[in-house]
Image: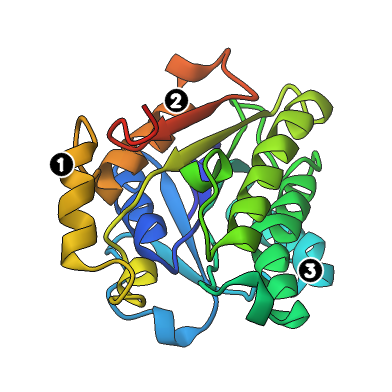
């Protein structure tokens, strides 16, 4: 794979990442980042799978340098990885909270730092997009560390937009999505929950592809003067 200034690294282990990989592969050369080989099944065609656990924080710099040396400088980084652990704080272990912050906050900041090296990113409208969540703006019971990690990432994106310019750094904040992450909690995200959300949100429940359309926009020349922003894609759930 080689396409000058058209290489995009996408975290593709979950539903949003896979949808973004498929959509962006129509315009870019997509490197799909997966935690382990069990995630290879169902990967969209036309993307290059890469195995790397984002919790290996000390290895991120070297990993990114190797990517640029092998595939060419990267035009964009789309960080989609995220973990959630739905528990009240009274029973949540410190190790469980630490994992949430390692994946949802520390790793994306370190990936952004590695991307910002001149040997890694291209000069053609370089861009970073973090997938956050509307939970960053409206916390709920049972997901306190998750909400806090996403709120911190929103703040970090604005700081990185200042530090890393002219690299653009933005967020896309989805509302509830029907993905493997939410399907793992059927008792919480039940059919009645989803039906109420469809009824109460002006545009209902968004799809992963609709979220990825916003990512596509933020990578494009149409957003060449947009940085430090967050696009909510929630069907109006926060209105």
Q: Residues within 10 Å of mark 2 (few under 14, many from 20)?
A: few
Q: Separation of disc 1 and disc 3 at Cα?
A: 42 Å
Q: Separation of disc 2 and disc 1 at Cα?
A: 33 Å
Q: Residue at x 65, y 62 (%)?
A: 145
Do residues under tags 1 and 3 come within 8 Å of each other at their CB atoms? no
Q: Residues within 10 Å of mark 1 (few under 14, many from 20)?
A: few
Q: Nearer the viewer, mark 2 or mark 3?
A: 3
Q: Residue at x 22, y 38 (%)?
A: 200
* Direction from residue 34 to residue 167 in the image, left or right: right
Labelled disc at residue 57 = 3
Q: Nearer the viewer, mark 2 or mark 1?
A: 1
Do residues under tags 2 and 3 come within 8 Å of each other at their CB atoms? no
Kindly give the residue lying farthest to the top in the view shown.
225
Do residues under tags 2 and 1 come within 8 Å of each other at their CB atoms? no
Can the viewer see residue 24? yes
Q: Nearer the viewer, mark 1 or mark 3?
A: 1
Identify the element where label 3 is drawn.
helix
Labelled disc at residue 59 = none
Quadrant housing residue 222: top left
* Direction from residue 186 to residue 103 in the image, left or right: right
Q: Residue at x 53, y 66 (%)?
A: 142
Labelled disc at residue 199 = 1
Q: Residue at x 39, y 33 (%)?
A: 238
* Chain-order first, disc 2 or disc 3: 3
Return the x and y of residue 63 as percentages of the image width and height.
Answer: 73, 66
Return the x and y of residue 16 as percentages of the image width and height.
Answer: 37, 55
Identify the element where label 2 is drawn.
loop
* Direction from residue 230 to residue 41 in the image, left or right: left
Return the x and y of residue 83 as percentages of the image width and height.
Answer: 55, 68
Can the viewer see residue 132? no
């Amino acid at each position: 794979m080689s396409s000058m200034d058209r290489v995009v690294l996408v975290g593709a282990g979950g539903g949003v990442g896979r949808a973004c990989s498929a959509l962006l592969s129509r315009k870019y050369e997509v490197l799909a980042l997966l935690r382990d080989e069990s995630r290879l099944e169902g990967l969209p065609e036309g993307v290059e799978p890469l195995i790397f656990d984002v919790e290996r924080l000390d290895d991120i710099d070297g990993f990114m340098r190797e990517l640029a040396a092998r595939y060419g400088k990267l035009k964009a980084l789309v960080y989609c990885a995220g973990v959630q652990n739905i528990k009240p704080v009274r029973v949540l272990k410190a190790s469980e909270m630490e994992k949430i912050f390692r994946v949802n906050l520390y790793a994306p900041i370190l990936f952004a730092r590695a991307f910002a090296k001149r040997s890694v990113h291209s000069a053609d409208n370089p861009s970073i997009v973090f997938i956050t969540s509307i939970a960053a703006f409206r916390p709920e019971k049972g997901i306190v560390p998750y909400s806090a990690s996403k709120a911190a990432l929103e703040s970090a994106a604005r700081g990185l937009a200042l530090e890393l310019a002219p690299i653009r750094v933005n967020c896309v904040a989805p509302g509830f999505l029907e993905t493997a992450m939410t399907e793992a909690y059927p008792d919480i995200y039940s059919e009645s929950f989803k039906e109420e959300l469809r009824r109460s949100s002006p545009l209902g429940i968004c799809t992963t592809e609709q979220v990825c359309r916003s990512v596509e926009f933020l990578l494009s020349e149409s957003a060449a003067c947009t940085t430090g922003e967050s696009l909510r894609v929630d069907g109006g759930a926060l209105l």
